[in-house]
């Protein structure tokens, strides 16, 4: 039986792109895949409490796959936007299209760091859950319209207008855990909107706030 401290150490190793090693009963070191590791240790969403502090480590040079859906348009896609060596432009375009301002049908090049933030949040939580995009790019006109219809929830100079912010939730994953993981990245702004049930992440300065 692994102690909590051991689990924490192994998880820490996992998070810096290091295949966890177990020594089995015969003294053999086993290299486990991430999925198998999470199965064996029972770590998954519950691992939020033992996140080590150095999760800023960049993602491994391995393919990065995201499943996204846009509840406003009903669109969904699965994209390997990073092939292990480089970002795949055609895949980023597909992601940009899904994250477009659906009200005005305007596509904008999203900051690809956002997709990496989503990948890192998923890695921390040990999930490949579908990412529901509540809001991606917002044209200035849409941002203004939303500002006029909300009570302080929409910033005048929103990073959504620069393709540098995404509001999202992970299908089937408790929002508070997604929030905790997003904060651990220390990668930009994080807004927590528990009533509206989404998390805002952006690639601006590291800061945090709570909305409705
Ligand atoms: Zn937002």
Image (cartoon, grey):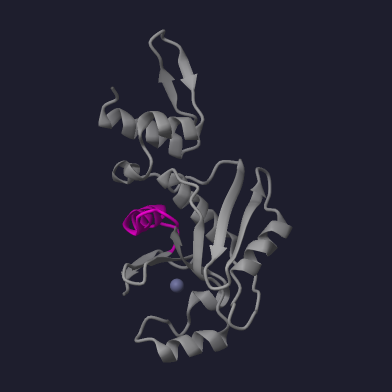
Asked whether 23 or 53 is in front, the reply is 23
Left or right: 187 in relation to 142: left
Q: In which quarter of the image is the C terminus?
A: bottom left
Asked whether 191 or 56 is in front, the reply is 191
- Answer yes or no: is residue 123 visible: yes
Relative image position of residue 29 (x, y in whole percent): 46, 16
Asked whether 126 or 70 is in front, the reply is 70
Kindly give the residue lying farthest to the right in the view shown.
90
Q: Is the magenta stretch mostly helix, strand or loop?
A: helix
Relative image position of residue 156 (x, y in whole percent): 45, 85
Residue at 40% x, 64% y is: 206
Relative image position of residue 23 (x, y in whole percent): 40, 16
Tell me: residue 149, above or below residue 206.
below
Kindly give the residue lying farthest to the front in the view shown.
74
Is 183 colored magenta in this rendering? Answer: yes
Is 14 colored magenta in this rendering? Answer: no
Q: In which quarter of the image is the N terminus?
A: top left
Relative image position of residue 146 (x, y in whole percent): 46, 86
Tell me: residue 39, above or below residue 178.
above
Q: Give the range drawn in magenta.
A: 171-188
Left or right: 129 in relation to 42: right
- Answer yes or no: is residue 51 visible: no
Residue at 32% x, 74% y is: 211
Tell me: residue 154, above or below residue 1.
below
Number of numbered callouts drawn: 0
Kindly give the residue lying farthest to the top in the view shown.
26
Residue at 59% x, 77% y is: 101
Tell me: residue 151, above or below residue 162.
below
Where on the image, by quarter, is ligand 1?
Answer: bottom left
């Amino acid at each position: 039986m692994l102690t909590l401290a051991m689990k924490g150490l192994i998880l820490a190793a996992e998070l810096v792109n290091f295949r966890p090693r177990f020594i089995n009963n015969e003294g053999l070191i086993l290299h486990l895949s991430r999925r198998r590791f999470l199965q064996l240790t029972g770590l998954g969403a519950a691992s939020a409490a033992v996140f080590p502090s150095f999760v800023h480590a960049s993602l491994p040079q391995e393919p990065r796959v995201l499943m996204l859906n846009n509840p406003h348009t009903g669109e969904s896609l699965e994209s390997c936007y990073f092939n292990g060596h480089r970002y795949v432009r055609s895949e980023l375009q597909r992601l940009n299209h899904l994250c477009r301002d659906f009200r005005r049908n305007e596509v904008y090049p999203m900051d690809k760091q956002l997709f990496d933030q989503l990948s890192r949040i998923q890695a921390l939580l040990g999930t490949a859950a579908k990412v529901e995009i509540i809001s991606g790019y917002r044209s200035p006109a849409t941002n203004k319209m939303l500002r006029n219809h909300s009570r302080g929830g929409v910033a005048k100079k929103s990073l959504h207008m620069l393709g540098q912010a995404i509001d999202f939730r992970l299908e089937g994953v408790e929002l508070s855990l997604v929030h905790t993981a997003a904060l651990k990245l220390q990668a930009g702004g994080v807004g927590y909107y528990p009533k509206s049930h989404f998390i805002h992440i952006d690639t601006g300065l590291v800061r945090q706030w709570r909305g409705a």
